[in-house]
């Protein structure tokens, strides 16, 4: 009986090792790059209204996200009136991580299926006269390039608004082309 138990343990260890190697081998190149860069996607935020997290039209994926972390806005408020530029940059990065988490969901967990980022629009909850929108949006744009390389290069628009949903300092609208 002891020999059978030992053989069973050996067999399951070998199978486990093979499965682990297979998992590593089949991991997407984009996921490997993210892991090497220390980029961790959050859980994809669930919709809080009457909408879907993404919409696919042909080979395009449309996504809108704010700076949610665990169901709460990261640094809520107005940039320039209580929210610093550094906090706004962190919120922009979080919103873009949320965009990529939703995109990952849209492509079935294989970010290698993303052909390219097409268009990003950054909308910022700013005080009157604020002009550094592009500096803030660079956080999101740079993150996409860190994740996707050349496939992350995109066109972009940024602008300020007097308010955003649930008092988020940023909202990002994104369009991606996928396989």
Image (tube, rainbow, N blue to C red):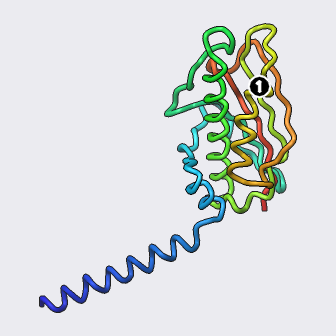
Q: Position of residue 103 (x, y in %)?
A: 68, 49
Q: Nearer the viewer, residue 7 or 150?
A: 150
Instruction: Please state the horizontal and vertical placement of residue 54, each as a whole percent of the image.
Output: 71, 44
On the picture, is 162 further left or further right than 41?
Answer: right
Q: Quadrant of the N terminus?
A: bottom left
Q: Describe the element under mark 1 as helix, strand or loop.
A: strand
How many numbered markers are drawn?
1
Q: Residue sitting at 63 percent across and 65 percent down? A: 28
Where residue 90 appears, as percent x and y from the top left, is 61, 29
The correct choice, above or below, for 43 with respect to 92 in the image is below
- Disc 1 crowd, CA 10 A, few/some/many (<14, 14-19, 20+): many
Please determine whether, in this image, residue 63 is positioned above or below residue 26: above
Residue depicted at 53% across the width and 44% down the height: 43
Q: Quadrant of residue 111?
A: bottom right
Q: Quadrant of residue 95?
A: top right
**Image-based side of 40 in relation to 6, left or right:** right
Q: In this view, which residue lies farthest toward the left?
A: 1
| Image location (x, y in percent) of residue 171 | 71, 28
Toward the viewer: 48 or 20?
A: 20
- Which image quadrant: the C terminus? bottom right
Above-or-below relation of 87 to 119: above
Name the residue rendered at 55%, 47% in the picture: 40
Q: Which residue is drawn at the image coordinates 82% and 27% (left, top)?
A: 158
The answer to which image quadrant residue 18 occupies is bottom left
Q: Which residue is mark 1?
A: 123
């Amino acid at each position: 009986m002891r020999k059978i138990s030992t053989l069973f343990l050996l067999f399951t260890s070998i199978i486990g090792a093979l499965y682990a190697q297979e998992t590593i081998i089949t991991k997407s190149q984009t996921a490997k790059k993210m892991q090497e860069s220390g980029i961790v996607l959050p859980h994809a935020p669930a919709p809080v209204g009457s909408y879907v997290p993404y919409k696919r039209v042909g080979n395009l994926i449309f996504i809108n996200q704010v700076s949610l972390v665990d169901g709460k806005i990261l640094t809520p408020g107005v940039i320039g009136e209580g929210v610093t530029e550094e906090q706004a940059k962190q919120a922009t990065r979080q919103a873009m991580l949320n965009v990529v988490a939703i995109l990952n969901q849209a492509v079935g967990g294989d970010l290698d299926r993303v052909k390219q980022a097409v268009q990003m629009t950054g909308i910022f909850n700013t005080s009157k006269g604020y002009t550094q929108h592009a500096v803030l949006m660079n956080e999101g744009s740079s993150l996409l390039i860190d994740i996707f390389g050349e496939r992350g290069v995109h066109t972009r628009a940024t602008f300020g608004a007097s308010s955003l949903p649930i008092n988020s300092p940023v909202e990002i609208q994104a369009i991606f082309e996928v396989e």
